[in-house]
Amino acid sequence: MSYAPGVQDDGTQAPGPLADRAALERCGEAVRARLTADPTAYRLPTDQAEIFAFGEFLSPAECERMIGLVDATAQPSIVYDEPRQSDFRTSYSGDVDRDDPFVRMIERRIDDLLGLEASWGEAIQGQRYHPGQQFMAHYDWFWTRAAYWPAEAARGGQRAWTAMAYLNDVEEGGQTQFTRLGLSVAPQRGALLVWNNATPDGAPNFATMHAALPVVRGVKYVITKWYRTRKWG
Ligand SMILES: O=C(O)CCC(=O)C(=O)O
Ligand SMILES: [Fe+2]
């Protein structure tokens, strides 16, 4: 079973007491320095969040192979805690097999790109969306006043960075939309999107709210890897 936080809000709620602030600040600084110096990184045009894109991070053959692994694990997605409407996250998802040497190789490449500690990374989660399926606006960071938080605090703490790769082109729909920033990213086979879920001073960044818009035509495959502020698990 795989989980993702998905608490919706109107932007006026407090995220709860700040957690792991110094660690988030350090992770932010370190990855920012690394990606800013990386000529293959394209920074999306906003100063309210740190979002970077990499074209062709995965080869077409790697995407195909990963799609097979997502298909092998994908189950109807569930979201954390609070009751919510049934259309909140309608994709199929699951953690891809971490013991697969191919998956380990891809994980290492993402760890390297970001320069983050491998052990801080969660297992790669795969997701498949069919027409009409979506993931409504949410944050990847955890609400520290939510029922799930004590368990998450004990297994790695707050989420720092998100890395998400598109495994295929989608005929229509399925964009990742940063709802507060007016930015939309269309799925593109092999592209990797990376963002800091925190502000530079280590607080949850509300500007990172994002949604996976419904797929209109075709099927959408993505993988997501989240990094915590310390060893995960
Ligand atoms: O599929 C997407 O475009 C976004 C997925 C996402 O936000 C997530 O997995 O947390
Ligand atoms: Fe997300």
Image (cartoon, rainbow, N blue to C red):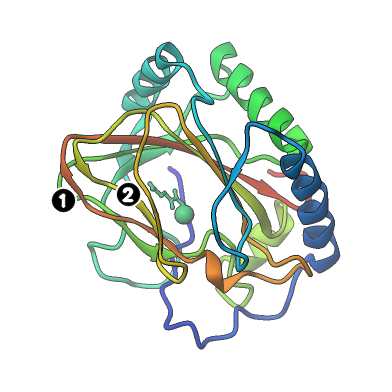
Q: Is mark 2 within 8 Å of ligand 1?
A: yes
- Secondary structure of the residue carrying numbered label 2: loop
Sort mark 1 into few (<14), some (14-19) or many (20+) by Cα contacts within 10 Å. Answer: some
Q: Is residue 71 left or right of residue 38?
A: left
Residue 139 picture location, percent across and down = 50, 64
Q: How far is mark 1 from mark 2, CA to CA?
A: 12 Å
Q: Is residue 94 above or below residue 147?
A: above
Residue 225 picture location, percent across and down = 56, 40
Sort mark 2 into few (<14), some (14-19) or many (20+) by Cα contacts within 10 Å. Answer: many
In the image shown, does 226 or 180 lie closer to the viewer? Answer: 180
Answer with mark 1 or mark 2, whichever residue precedes in sequence. Answer: 1
Residue type, numbered disc 2: Gln
Give the residue drawn at x 59%, y 12%.
101
Q: Which mark is residue 73?
A: none
Q: Is residue 26 left or right of residue 67?
A: right
Give the residue drawn at x 61%, y 63%.
49
In the image shown, does 56 or 162 lie closer to the viewer? Answer: 56
**Quadrant of the image containing the N terminus:** top left
Q: Is residue 89 visible?
A: yes
Pointer 2 residue: 175
Pointer 1 residue: 132
Where residue 182 sits, quadrant-wise, is: bottom left
Residue type, numbered disc 1: Gly
Residue 233 picture location, percent across and down = 68, 43
Q: Nearer the viewer, mark 1 or mark 2?
A: 2
Q: Is residue 170 above or below residue 25?
A: above
Q: Is residue 147 visible?
A: no
Q: Is residue 191 above or below residue 230?
A: above
Residue 155 picture location, percent across and down = 70, 51
- Secondary structure of the residue carrying numbered label 1: loop
